[in-house]
Image (spheres, rainbow, N blue to C red):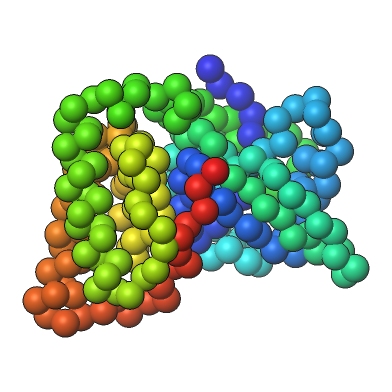
């Protein structure tokens, strides 16, 4: 089922269940927030976050290309600042695929035509009842604990639910955008956990065997999952 969805291209990947705070200062995205607030309860107050494939976040004609699979960011909190900026808190919900851009939308921000990608996490196959997913989740949990220990990333215990675990690990690992995007696009929990096992094996080899630490800023942990 195709529907229209405002887009907010970013240099990051949003996963279902993860919280994403944003400082909104560009006029077109301030207009987006205002439109969502004005809609009230008549429509779901959300927009699509898609990772930028080429270009950058800020400025005119900043985005040259973007990935076509993204995640809906549901608006949870909005604070308007004295200078007109907005501080907002969103949470990822369901995944979608962009099928086209609605050029007739008449909005300063992009409005896309999208269709569901995979299933809403709440409607996914119950991975907790899937023995294969449970086995994969146990291995991911063990490797992820070693990974966090080596990189000195604190936090609470990894969740037991395989689906929740798969999205949390995808968000918390230090990865390039292309790797995060690949995890977002995995069709189901088992596929995502298998890919994470490979990525954790790769990263642990770098850290433990070569003594290398990723040359990038570590993500805040624990990533908030609601």
Residue 163, x across and y down, in percent: 35, 36
91 and 132: which one is in front? 132
Residue 22, x across and y down, in percent: 65, 59
Is 150 above or below relative to 127?
Answer: below
122 and 188: which one is in front? 122
Residue 217, x across and y down, in percent: 42, 76
Q: Within the image, what quadrant is residue 191 found in?
A: top left
Q: Within the image, what quadrant is residue 184 found in?
A: top left
Q: Residue furthest right?
A: 82
Is 115 above or below relative to 13?
Answer: above
Please report the residue visible at 58 percent of the width from the left and 30 percent of the height from the top.
113
Please report the residue visible at 18 percent of the width from the left and 27 percent of the height from the top.
131
Please report the residue visible at 16 percent of the width from the left and 53 percent of the height from the top.
198
Residue 88, x across and y down, in percent: 72, 55
74 and 64: which one is in front? 74
Q: Residue furthest top?
A: 1
Q: Residue furthest left?
A: 209
Q: Residue furthest front?
A: 157
Q: Within the image, what quadrant is residue 69 found in?
A: top left
The quarter of the picture where the C terminus appears is: top right
76 and 44: which one is in front? 76
Q: Is 12 left, or right, of 162 in this rendering?
A: right
* Residue 111 visible in image: no
Please report the residue visible at 17 percent of the width from the left and 30 percent of the height from the top.
132
* Residue 135 visible in image: yes
């Amino acid at each position: 089922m195709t529907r229209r969805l405002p887009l907010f291209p970013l240099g990051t990947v949003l996963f279902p269940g993860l919280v994403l705070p944003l400082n909104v200062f560009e006029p077109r995205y301030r207009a987006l927030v205002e439109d969502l607030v004005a809609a009230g309860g008549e429509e779901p107050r959300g927009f699509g976050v898609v990772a930028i494939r080429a270009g950058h976040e800020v400025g005119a004609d900043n985005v040259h290309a973007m990935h076509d699979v993204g995640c809906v960011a549901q608006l949870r909190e909005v604070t308007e600042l004295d200078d007109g900026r907005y501080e907002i808190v969103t949470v990822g919900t369901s995944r979608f695929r962009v099928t086209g851009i609605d050029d007739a939308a008449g909005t300063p921000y992009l409005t896309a035509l999208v269709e569901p990608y995979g299933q809403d996490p709440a409607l996914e196959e119950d991975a907790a009842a899937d023995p294969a997913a449970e086995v994969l989740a146990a291995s991911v949990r063990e490797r992820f604990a070693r990974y966090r220990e080596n990189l000195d990333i604190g936090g609470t215990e990894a969740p037991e639910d395989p689906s929740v675990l798969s999205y949390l690990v995808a968000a918390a690992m230090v990865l390039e955008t292309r790797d995060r995007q690949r995890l977002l696009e995995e069709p189901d929990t088992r596929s995502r956990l298998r890919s994470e096992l490979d990525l954790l094996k790769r990263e642990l080899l770098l850290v433990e065997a070569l003594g290398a630490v990723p040359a990038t800023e570590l993500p805040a942990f624990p990533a908030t999952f609601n």
